[in-house]
Image (cartoon, helix red, strand yellow):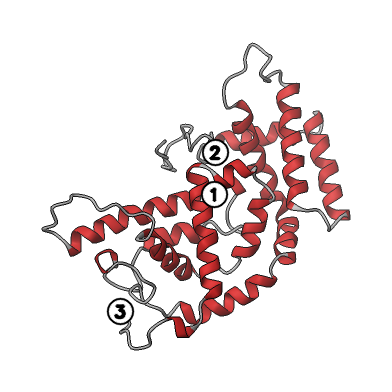
Amino acid sequence: TNTNTNTNTNTNTNIDDAFSYFHPLDNGFQVLFEQLLLDPRFEEGRIITKWKDLEKKNKNLTMRNISRFLYHLTQTLLKNTELTSDKPYFQPHFFEATHLMICRCIFPRSKELVQCIVTKNSEKDISYSKQLAWMSELTQEQLGVDARLCGPKHSTAYAQAIQHIKEVEIGICLTPQDSVIGLIEAVHSIQKTATAYYHDHCPNAQDKDIVVNGDTLFPIVVFCVIQSTVHTWHAWLHCMENFFRKEILYFGQSGFCFTLLKATISYVMSRTPSHFTSDTKTDT
């Protein structure tokens, strides 16, 4: 299934069989939904109040705890509004849509807890930051990007994809769902931009489009992830692995992009300056 991640639309998006539903944020609907969800007169509002009290008292809550809480809160809301699968007004993706909107309500209100979880899983990210300090100076060619797919300038190459990656960071993104969609958008942007660069380099090529995947895609992803300067990937991976079902992280487009990112982080962590030639001229 092709992923339509156009954030200017308000229609639902089929991501794949695992990540079956997503819709862009609509502040108008979200605000109305949150007014209902947080209303203390209803069971859901009282449950959230108790959860917030638990957050304040227990600093050992995990991303798995958050995931379970949001799952059960979604079930409770659908049951109380008679929108479960055994009711006449049930529609496909009710659960996924409601769960997404609940996540968009709770995560911004739990930033302190999420930051605590991130901090506890940041040891490897200290080493990753040290790797970034010198690898950010490497050129596209040094990282193995096909010469036909290199951007014109190091500072502007794959700028849109890099911006998408910056917005994936757990402290910036609304929810884990939005974060994974941002990652998918980044990979799609890389493929689209690489095709454009290919036509710039090879205007007389017989093939209208070059297939950007596998061996040609990976070095570009490495370049973009490094240039994003995001340095909390190990904490991000921990959060995603403890929030989502395995089907989402290892199957379909979401699984492909997640696995690609994990491979990128492993690659960055395993490199030393000796892996790269020092006589390659920097593209400026």
The mark nearer the N terminus, 1 or 3, is 1
Percent x, y for residue 121? 71, 65
Percent x, y for residue 114? 71, 56
Left or right: 70 in relation to 176: right
The mark nearer the N terminus, 2 or 1, is 2
Question: Which one is nearer the viewer's eye here, 161 or 187?
Answer: 187
Q: Provide the secondary structure element on which disc 3 rests.
A: loop
Q: Residue furthest bottom?
A: 279
Are discs 1 and 3 less than 8 Å apart at CB?
no
Disc ID at residue 180 = 1
Question: Which one is nearer the viewer's eye here, 197 or 6?
Answer: 197
Are discs 3 and 2 less than 8 Å apart at CB?
no
Distance from Cα at disc 3 to Cα at disc 2: 39 Å
- The residue beneath circle 2 is 19
Disc ID at residue 283 = 3
Type of amino acid at the residue the image marks with label 1: Val
Quadrant occupied by the N terminus: top left
Q: Provide the secondary structure element on which disc 1 rests.
A: helix
Are discs 2 and 1 less than 8 Å apart at CB?
yes
Type of amino acid at the residue the image marks with label 3: Asp
Q: Is residue 175 visible?
A: no
Residue plotted at (27% across, 55% down):
195
Q: Is residue 254 above or below residue 58?
A: above
Distance from Cα at disc 2 to Cα at disc 1: 10 Å
Specify few, some or many for label 3: CA neighbours under 10 Å numbering under 14, 14-19, or 20 or more: few
Residue plotted at (85% across, 54% down):
56
The mark nearer the N terminus, 3 or 2, is 2
